[in-house]
């Protein structure tokens, strides 16, 4: 029998102070004694309920209870000791939607607005956060990905640690970071980032990506703009808006200039497609330039690898990541075991022959430009 990860008693104040027992399990919340004797079960993934937290103004705005809301309507209200309500909120964070984010955050500024989402900065207490607003709150895959990552977090992935809901939208709450990989490149006046820094950043990217792939999540939109850095240069991969759950997908999407060859062909898109995109990022860190100038070059397979790469292990790893054949392309684990990271500088990879890349353009065939690609961005 599964034991609850939290349980405590509360008063159901809309039913003359009936005492209920709330138990929280990994995938559900159970309210025993609801409405004087019933049992109410809220399955976290499927429930249409969300929770609004109530505060006692007379007690310095301490948590005093919670209200079950459905379709933007407050329905059932409960009160309890501060410690009990605080504990309940802590264990439900990221498992079930909360309601009325304006009650707990103050809007600061708009960061980004597109057809599909809005991203803005908010303040809670002294902490800056980011809220990403999604338009579909019914079967949103991005929310599912964040659910998985909330259960299995990783230091190099930035996912939402809590979310709010109403009848129309989802509000993903994340930590705010104001520095990106683009900013790091600008620190060096768009010159080459030192190799020791590149190695540290790429290793963290691969570790975050390996965690995604081991949990069958394909990011599908790795690019400079989706990589953030903390002040101590900890890498954070974020934006799972195009991500897919599973070993492969036929949904073709991403950002022009970073897309793997199979995206333009009648081939499944897998975790190896993420490795190709990361290879483009690696090349840009090494040289200051991508391997494609635009989407058209990306579609045509006109990949241009710099001839100025001096470190043989960096070049060998790069070409292993950019291999056109997904079967021969490295996995994240392969990359992490490469001499570029472990220091065996006299042992280049044997998976590919470097002589094949002496004239890169001659090695890449043109792909049909009539292939339909959806959800591409530039």
Image (spheres, helix red, strand yellow):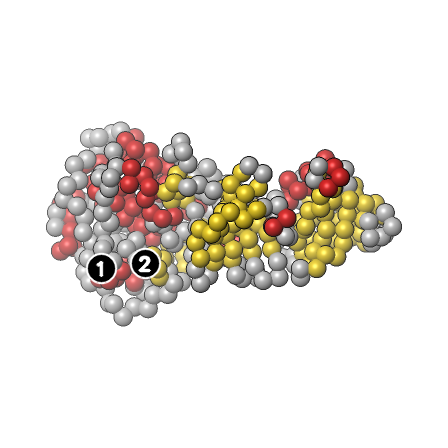
Above or below residue 193? Residue 159 is below
Could you tell me which residue is drawn at 72 percent across and 35 percent down? 83
Residues at marks 2 and 1 touching, judged by CB atoms closer than 8 Å: no
Residue with the most extreme bottom position? 370
Q: In this image, 91 relative to 316: left or right? A: right
Which numbered circle lies on residue 297? Answer: 1
Pointer 1 local density, CA inside 10 Å: few below 14, some 14–19, many at least 20: some
Q: Quadrant of the C terminus?
A: bottom left
Which numbered circle lies on residue 312? Answer: none
Q: In the structure shown, which secondary structural element does the residue marked by tag 2 occupy?
A: loop
Could you tell me which residue is drawn at 29 percent across and 46 percent down? 281
Could you say where residue 215 lies in the image, as x and y percent from the top left?
A: 47, 47
Res. 146 in view: no
Could you say where residue 147 lies in the image, as x and y percent from the top left?
A: 54, 49
Residue that mark 2 sits on? 378
Q: Quadrant of the N terminus?
A: top right
The Cα–Cα distance between marks 2 and 1, rounded to whole angstroms, is 12 Å
Q: In the structure shown, which secondary structural element does the residue marked by tag 1 occupy?
A: helix
Quadrant in the rendering for residue 249: bottom left
Q: In this image, 312 relative to 71: left or right? A: left
Quadrant in the rendering for residue 344: top left
């Amino acid at each position: 029998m599964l034991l609850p990860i939290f349980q405590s008693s509360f008063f159901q104040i809309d039913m003359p102070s009936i005492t209920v027992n709330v138990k929280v399990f990994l995938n559900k919340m159970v309210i025993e004694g609801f409405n004087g004797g019933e049992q109410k079960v809220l399955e976290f993934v499927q429930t249409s309920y969300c929770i609004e937290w109530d505060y006692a103004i007379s007690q310095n705005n301490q948590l005093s209870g919670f209200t079950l809301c459905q379709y933007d309507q407050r329905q059932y209200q409960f009160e309890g000791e501060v410690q009990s309500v605080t504990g309940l909120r802590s264990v439900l964070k990221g498992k079930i939607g909360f309601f009325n984010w304006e009650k707990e955050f103050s809007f600061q500024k708009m960061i980004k607005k597109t057809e599909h989402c809005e991203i803005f900065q908010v303040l809670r207490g002294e902490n800056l956060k980011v809220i990403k607003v999604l338009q579909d709150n019914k079967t949103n895959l991005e929310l599912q990905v964040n659910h998985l990552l909330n259960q299995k977090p990783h230091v190099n992935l930035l996912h939402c640690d809590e979310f709010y809901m109403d009848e129309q939208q989802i509000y993903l709450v994340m930590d705010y970071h104001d520095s990106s990989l683009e900013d790091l490149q600008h620190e060096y006046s768009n010159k080459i980032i030192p190799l020791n820094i590149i190695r540290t950043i790429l290793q963290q990217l691969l570790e975050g990506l390996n965690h995604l792939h081991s949990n069958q999540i394909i990011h599908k939109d790795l690019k400079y703009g989706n990589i953030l850095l903390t002040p101590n240069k900890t890498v954070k991969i974020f934006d799972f808006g195009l991500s897919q759950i599973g070993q492969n997908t036929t949904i073709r999407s991403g950002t022009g200039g970073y897309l793997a060859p199979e995206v333009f062909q009648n081939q499944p898109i897998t975790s190896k497609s993420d490795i190709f995109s990361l290879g483009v990022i690696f090349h840009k860190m090494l040289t200051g330039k991508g391997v494609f100038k635009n989407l058209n070059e990306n579609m045509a397979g006109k990949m241009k690898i710099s001839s100025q790469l001096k470190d043989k292990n960096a070049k060998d790893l790069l070409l292993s990541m950019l291999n056109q054949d997904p079967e021969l392309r490295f996995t994240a684990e392969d990359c992490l075991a490469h001499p570029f990271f472990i220091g065996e500088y006299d042992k280049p990879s044997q998976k590919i022959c470097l002589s094949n890349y002496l004239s890169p353009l001659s090695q890449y065939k043109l792909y049909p430009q009539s292939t339909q690609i959806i959800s591409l961005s530039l």
